[in-house]
Amino acid sequence: MNGTMRLSRFQETAIYPKSQCKERIRRNFPKHFFYSHEVSFFLFSLLNLTSFVYLHHHHHRLLLLLLQEIKRRRKYPCSKMYFQLNTIRDMTIVNSTTPQRQITSVPSIDPKNAPNLDFLAETREAMDDFLRLCVPLHKLALEGNWPAANRIINEDRRLKYAALARGWPTVLHVAAGANHVHFVKELLQILDDHHIALQDMRGNTAFCFAAGSGNMDIVRLLLDRNRFFPKIRGGSGRTPVHFAALQGKCEMAWFLYDLTKDIFEDLDWKLLFFTCINTGNYGSYY
């Protein structure tokens, strides 16, 4: 069966219930298909011949089932398939007469909501305050020591929304990334909504850090304050679901997917697809 016919069979299979889809996948994609380069060429053709933005949800479901079958039957790891897909893509770009956009990242953005930078100013007073307040507060946030951190914050209330280091992380960024649920819960009680959405130098919100760490409790706490967090793009224009996928947080990626997919552009779909292939982050929660 050639690639075109296999793509056609893929489209036809999408209309069947999940139980029948699995059987038809095994019938139309035989054993030798999963142990050859053909599987990588097929997936790449699927990416190029269809726009993920306009794919029906049945096709998304079927693609996930196909990936599960690939994961179950392949003899070598997902990283090798990812390498094959990248190699095929690079060959296509080199041999193409029309320019194609890379799909390893999306356009970077400047932080729209930067924290207070007073403690990073190059003055003697600012440097003294940085060493006296920011350095220990950063350490306490990493450790999850809320009582001690709160005492430092009370010395200068700007610390609630200030950058604590050169990359502009706030105390919320640090605590969320370090998985300290109690610390985050207490901190949120003294933060305004504007402060919760502050972005670091790369454009990442604390929600991006929580998504990347895979902490559902912290993500839900932040969502209670701002339900639009999943749609605020961070570094390189990635959404929080991309951060979860990059870190291999499958449960988090599934949770954020439904909250994010309505803003996806074609490039976002492809980036998420390749990221999941690279990390083997698919199938477990379907």
Image (tube, grey):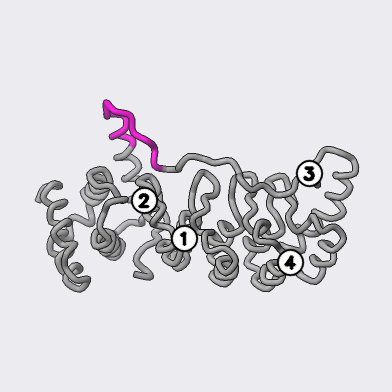
Q: Decide which of 107, 74 is in the foreground and name it.
A: 107
Instruction: Specify the amino acid type for callout 4.
Output: Ile
Q: How far apart are marks 4 and 3 (CA)?
A: 23 Å
Residue position for label 2: 269
The residue that mark 1 highlights is 248
Marks 4, 2: nearer the viewer: 4
Asked whether residue 6 appears in the rendered view, the answer is yes
Instruction: Please report contact status of discs 3 and 2: CB closer than 8 Å, yes or no.
Output: no
Residue at the far top: name it: 97
Left or right: 170 in relation to 284: right
Where residue 73 sits: x, y (%)? 26, 63
Mark 4–mark 1 CB contact (< 8 Å): no
Q: Is residue 70 visible?
A: no
Mark 3 or mark 2: which comes first in sequence? 3
Give, as a three-letter code, the residue at label 3: Leu
How many residues crowd mark 2 within 10 Å: few (<14), some (14–19), many (20+)?
A: some
Q: Which residue is drawn at 54% across and 59% down?
A: 229
